[in-house]
Image: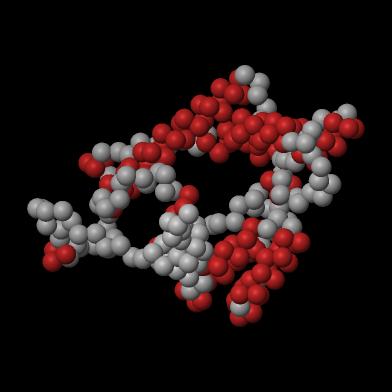
Amino acid sequence: MAANFMTRFKSVEGKRYLINVAYSPSKAGYVWYMDALRGVSPTMVDWAGRFRNEIWLQHCDNSRQFGHITTNMSECINEVLKGIRYLPISTIVRITYERLQKLFVTKSREAQSQMAAECQFSQRLLAAIEKNREGIPKMRVTHCDRRALSLHYPCHHALAGCAAASIEWVPYVHPVYKHKAIFKVYEMEFSPIPEESMWVVWHGTRLCPNLAMHRKATRRPVSTRFWNDMDETEQHKKRCGLCRQYGHTRRGCPNQSTGDV
């Protein structure tokens, strides 16, 4: 959505406000950033209002997305495909399969080991709970922005309430954070890729490569990069190196010392 916004309006400031609108966990934050976006251009607000709120606003998703907004699968598999760009498609498919297989084996063993040690929840959840506990003694704000509630585990306000009422916080954690649920994700088995001689004969359509587009055996292949909104940088006004003000440089600074005492 941010990419489409930049294609339409070419405003880095407006894009920043739009992203803050989408990620705001409360309606108050949504209204504030919407007003800021309207101050940039009312047309931008009208453009964003064309979309249904539940598909792009975090405070309207009824906590179904666990704090996640993006659905771009390419962002999720960048780590898996790291270091294998510009390789043939068949090689990328094979490497993706092998790396996913190793990842599932590693994560499955970790979940099994922690279940054997009678650990109920994941280490990341316990670290987040411990961090929220550290903020209880310093807590002065009585308003909760519901950010942690969208993640389905207690925030420091909820932990303080549990401590005051002498009740456990465990029942207020979603079952998805338990090791049993994590193990179900990674328990899938990967069948090894058989040898080519054992493949089933294919009688369907065959794709023939265009020999005119065959890559040269010598020299480095030419890579074509398509620029998008991520490559655009915000232009900053230059400041004076002496007084740090706008409108002039160090040479023409009116506040420059003349050397007279």
Residue lying at 46% horizontally and 31% vertically, measured from the top left: 105
Q: Is residue 32 above or below residue 134?
A: below
Residue farthest along the left direction in this orientation? 218
The quadrant in which residue 71 appears is bottom right
Q: Which scheme is used to colour this image of the protein?
A: secondary structure
Q: Is residue 244 above or below residue 39?
A: above
Residue lying at 59% horizontally and 56% vertically, measured from the top left: 69
Name the residue nearer the viewer: 121 or 18: 18
The quadrant in which residue 190 appears is top left
Question: Residue 97 vs residue 142: left or right?
Answer: left
Q: Position of residue 195 (x, y in %)?
A: 26, 38
Residue farthest along the right direction in this orientation? 165
Residue farthest along the top direction in this orientation? 117
Residue lying at 56% horizontally and 22% vertically, measured from the top left: 113
Q: Quadrant of the N terminus?
A: bottom right
Q: Is residue 65 above or below residue 103?
A: below
Name the residue nearer the viewer: 153 or 96: 153
The quadrant in which residue 232 appears is bottom left
Q: Position of residue 216 (x, y in %)?
A: 11, 57
Name the residue nearer the viewer: 27 or 206: 27
Answer yes or no: is residue 115 visible: yes
